Amino acid sequence: MKISVNSSELYMLPCKRARGGEAVVGEEGQIYSPETLLKKQKSLDLPPIASATKTTAATTASGNAKSSDKSTTSGDSNNRCNSGSDSLIMALGNGNSSDIDEDLHSRQLAVYGRETMRRLFASNILVSGMQGLGAEIAKNLILAGVKSVTLHDEGVVELWDLSSNFIFSEDDLGKNRALASVQKLQELNNAVAINTLANELTKEQLSDFQAVVFTDISLDKAIEFNDYCHNHQPPIAFIKSEVRGLFGNVFCDFGPEFTVFDVDGNEPYTGIIASISNDNPALVASVDDERLEFQDGDLVVFSEVQGMIELNDGKPRKVKNARPYSFAIDEDTTNYSAYEKGGIVTQVKQPKVLNFKPLREALKDPGDFLLSDFSKFDRPPLLHLLFQALDKLILELGCFPVAGSEEDAQKFISLVTSMNDSLGDSRIEEIDHKVLRQFAFGSRAVLNPMAAMFGGIVGQEVVKACSGKFHPLFQFFYFDSVESLPTEPLDPSDFQPLNSRYDAQISVFGSKLQKKLEEAKVFIVGSGALGCEFLKNLALMGVSCSNQGKLTITDDDVIEKSNLSRQFLFRDWNIGQAKSTVAASAAALINPHLNIEALQNRANPESENVFNDTFWENLNVVVNALDNVNARLYIDQRCLYFQKPLLESGTLGAKCNTQMVIPHLTENYGASRDPPEKQAPMCTVHSFPHNIDHCLTWARSEFEGLLEKTPAEVNAYLSSPSEYTLAMKNAGDAQARENLDRILECLDKERCESFQDCITWARLKFEDNFADRVKQLTFTFPEDAATSNGTPFWSAPKRFPRPLQFSVDDLSHLHFVMAASILRAETFGIPIPDWVKSPGKLADAVNKVIVPDFQPKENVKIETDEKATNLSAASIDDAVVINDLVTKLENCQKQLPPGFKMNPIQFEKDDDTNYHMDLIAGLANMRARNYGIPEVDKLKAKFIAGRIIPAIATATAMATGLVCLELYKVLDGGHKVEDYRNTFANLALPLFSMAEPVPPKVVKHQDLSWTVWDRWIIKDNPTLRELLQWLQDKGLCAYSISFGSCLLFNSMFPKHKDRMDKKLVDLVRDVAKAELPPYRRHFDVVVACEDEDDNDIDIPQISIYFS
């Protein structure tokens, strides 16, 4: 089925962000004018943040790029989307800035932080060269939300460009590339000003920008522009990148002295101190369950140390002899006070100054190349030479070498040889002429996967240049993927253009592989950030773009606002619509020939009637675009079962990884797993938190218990009281008792009938959680309490808590009551009055609440066992208590109004107007205040409690580009395991690590061998006897055969011999009572076998085909 949509419906413009004259709040609350910010930025040795009052003109073909207050751009600079209320300014240290739309940019904020985002919002960028690479870079920067992007290109759109540029269509042929790009790029983010330059660029125009990127420029011109940028005051970040067929490079120069403020983006590491010696040097040890991440040379500061208070002076100290649970500091503590207890040690992140060389110097003395593939450790120096030779050859020929032309290839080889000979001691000893031919033949082509990959890398380098966040690429990076070429030799005629949109790709891979791409049957699972990028890439590559091909994409999710900052096929008009449908429609606009079907089914066992055997058997390849491990493992098992290639990838912030799962060549995805995340013990979260994560975990649990689970239990009881109470009586355990107790409490003494009741409930919850429970805890375990072996009970990592005293003058207390009362009112269907958002009126209402005095009780059981998994203690009286609760509930039910039911609230993190995160942040921060733990703002609370996965468009683009380079190999067929590459990359460092996949484990028996990929298939509806004989012929004695949990045969049971001549399908239906659906043509059995020496042999799964 071909998809067609109306482009005007799809491309609706998102929310607008202003860029004019506003003041900005600094980290410590200072208010900076735009002019002050400019001075501050220069003093910090960063690329300058442009004055917010300055706008860059929307330029026309005349090439004018000067600033003008009267100029217009394609972005809107007078509107801003703000979330949050003006009526109540109490946000628990929220730190919200009106210049950042946190709903839109939440995942990006989780990577960059507010300060980096503000610097991006003030940065003007030039992207020169709007072929595929330039389009990818511009897309990533516009999604990131820079102030402006100016597009420069003097050329016109050609059919050749459609192989790699998602912006252009055949309607744009003959138009200037920059001008033709504006509309669709603007639709990605209307808050970014998109400007154009269509005439020759002068170096003076570069002064309007904080960073300039060139993707299609001669070396001489690049040196001229780079010299200007390098010597400019302040320096202008200069990036040059090229993609030539399957070869690419990046060069960065951010000036003579560039300061990196955060080299890796990691939070400063911390440790909880267990002991400090009076020694020279002093030895610091941490608690047993807190592994330290410090390295020699790190600087750390100490706080909260009791006894050796001399270390609490805030002075950074250098770490040496770092170990997993200890380190030394280069300091003599012999005469310091003796360490008693407590203490936190925190890493101090140090800025780093980099001295970049200009391009003219770096070409001659490139220094160390950033290596990506250790199997090609000698490749970067060769590519350094080849790109220079290509530039020289183009100057001589006036055009690129022609694909398949041996004459042009020989000219290139001769030029490279000559240039290499002139290098003297730096010459390359051996040059592979095959690589030179491959380079020359594909040099004119910009391939989409290469553009996507390098678009991610370069986009990230621009962010670094504008913000000082993450370590820049220093200074050259070279990459090639010649392994992606077809395994069979190509005839020069295979490279001939066909006057199609794929001609550039054909010039590299030939027309035969192009036909395979077009006829491929592909399954993409997931249509989020990865899925959108994959759809764009595959559409441009021509995958499934014929009547014989088909691309199926499925995703059961709908579009949310937070998706728009990286899932670039979606617009704000699409919010609430099915992701897969909208993405498929957008992909069909990129390439109208795409044969795509969009489904909304989650791929799991319940949807196997949709994704049935026929569906899987017809596939050529599966591409995962998922965001959770369980779904990945399921798809991995299906690909194993049907022996289909699986291309796997994932991102986390600036990191990305790819894994190729190829039948019979590599291990499967599930063969190796990351260790599970360490979970905090329940008693730690409930009573002994020592970091903000514990507080937020508790807060999320409290939210769900009070506002979702209890109201849902109430409704379950009210919908069928007799059945519910009978089920609780039959259970008769602590959980049943607790459920009934919560229902009774909610409907009896805590039932709310007015909004004042909700305020009373919220105020008493504050008292219970942050005063009474703490008083009880410290009564049960006083500050001087000791354990059974005599050690202090309150020793690290435990922190001794203090109760809070409620005050209406504390806005954080009042905000907690406001959020809690509003949400409580929602659960009871009580109207919420406007006055609740007025601090004065809310304080008056809170002051009416009578708070009873609290007296701690003796012999209260507080769980301290870290292995405990349930805080509800079982009791021999549970049954009696449950009967009593049931009786009370029956009486309480009679007092309820007819038809009464509650409204459970399901936690939604991405709506800042619903007060969910306000309450969770309030709960967590008040608890943190109890225990002396640093508090967090609402945004940080959202990241942790909402379990938000940090995500940026650059890492996503790079991952999908790498996967699509592998897709060429899969669809060509015939590649060996050493041709494939798995990749781990961290754009923050930057680090690129590529390696061939691990082959699968082989099991051998006699002359047979098999791997996890093998599945033994027996057709023609065999009997039990025939299956046993089939195995016997392989030297295997089957002693047990099972279907699911049902035993079909076991040699120890004499009666099972009566089943020998029955069809296995009949045994499955009659013995296992299985209902085999009409679409199912086979079933699977697990067979336990021994060899002739009675050794167990682990054999593959056996599939029995019965029709």
Image (cartoon, grey):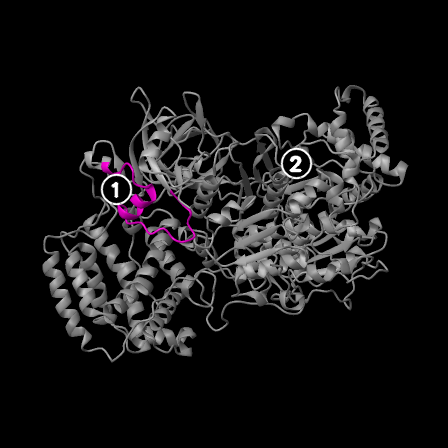
Q: Is residue 293 left or right of residue 993?
A: left
Which residue range is magenta in the image?
1058-1083
Q: Residue 867, labelled with which disc?
A: 1
Which amino acid type is shown beneath numbered disc 1? Lys
Q: Provide residue 88's location: percent of width, then percent of height.
A: 46, 71
Q: Is residue 498 left or right of residue 657?
A: right
Vertical side of 839 occupied by 212: above or below:
above
Question: How many numbered tags mark residues here?
Answer: 2
From the image, tell me which residue sits under label 2. 484
Which amino acid type is shown beneath numbered disc 2? Ser
Crowding at dot 2, Cα within 10 Å, few <14 / some 14-19 / many 20+, comes out as: many
Of mark 2 and mark 1, the one earlier in the sequence is 2
1076 in the magenta segment: yes
Quarter occupied by the N terminus: bottom right
**Tag 1, which secondary structure?**
loop
Query: Residue at the bottom extreme?
Result: 898
Q: Nearer the viewer, residue 870 or 211?
A: 870
**Residue depicted at 32% across the width and 48% down the height:** 689
Q: Would residue 975 be visible to someone looking at this image?
A: yes
Q: Is residue 348 left or right of residue 14?
A: left
**Residue depicted at 53% across the width and 65% down the height:** 577
983 in the magenta segment: no
Q: Quadrant of residue 1024?
A: top left
Q: Is residue 38 left or right of residue 727?
A: right
Query: Marks 2 and 1, Cα distance to the nearest angstrom?
Result: 51 Å
Q: Provide residue 895's location: percent of width, then percent of height.
A: 19, 78
